[in-house]
Image: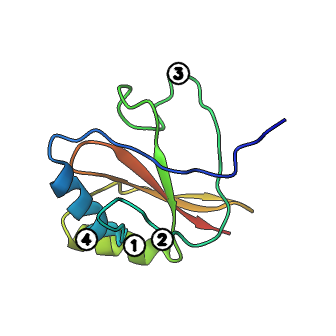
Amino acid sequence: MERVLGIGGYFLRATDPAALNAWYRDCLGLDADENGLWRQGAGPTVFATFESDTDYFGSRAQRTMLNFRVGDLDAMLAQLRAKGADVAEETQDMEGVGRFGWVTDPEGNRIELWQPA
């Protein structure tokens, strides 16, 4: 059986694509080029499905949630708050997995930030 090799892209609809790209660059440091190519650091990727009525993604209208690996969750959340981003107050610790926090981008997409254990 042929298998996928990894995630090749993640695409978002936006009312202002340039502004949303700038937010991801300026707030999260996602340094994609003019074609959207971003060379990410090596590391684990989780693929998981959730029940259709989950509130974990925020709005029920949001069908997927992007998760970014970070080196220092507290520093990233502080950086986002300093830039005026909509950061959830709570964080979550999962033994053996790591720490999680959440931010909502200017288009209303909830994003998970993960500091692996």
* Identity, as a three-letter code, of the amino acid under mark 4: Asp
Residues tagged 2 and 1 counted as in contact (Cβ below 8 A): yes
Label 1 packing within 10 angstroms: few (<14), some (14-19), many (20+): some
Q: Position of residue 94 (x, y in %)?
A: 66, 57
Q: Is the Cβ of the residue at disc 2 closer than 8 Å to that at disc 3?
A: no
How far apart in space, not on screen, are marks 3 and 1 (Cα)? 29 Å
Q: Which residue is mark 4?
A: 26
From the viewer's side, name the closer residue of 45 and 9: 9
Tag 1: residue type?
Met
In this rendering, position of residue 103 left or right of residue 72: left
User: 58 or 106, which lies in front?
Assistant: 106
Residue 47 place in picture, x, y as percent: 65, 44
Q: CA distance from mark 3 to mark 4?
A: 32 Å
Q: Marks 4/2: CA distance?
A: 17 Å
The earlier-in-sequence mark between 4 and 2 is 4
Location of residue 11 in the rendering, given as x and y in whole percent from the top left corner = 39, 44
* Element class at badge 4: helix
Residue at image position (18%, 65%) is 84
Q: Amino acid at mark 3?
A: Ser
- Residue at horizontal 76 percent and vertical 42 percent from the top: 3
Residues under labels 2 and 1: Cα distance? 5 Å
**106 up-or-down from 69: above or below:** above
Q: CA distance from mark 4 to mark 1?
A: 12 Å
Q: Which mark is residue 76?
A: 1
Judging by the rendered image, the residue that carries numbered circle 2 is 73
Q: Is residue 91 visible?
A: no
Residue 50's place in the image compared with 44, above or below, is above
Mark 4 or mark 1: name the one nearer the start of the chain. Answer: 4
Q: Give the number of the disc on residue 52.
A: 3
Q: Is residue 60 above or below residue 1?
A: above
Which numbered disc, 3 or 4, marks the residue closer to the eye? 4
Q: How many marks?
A: 4
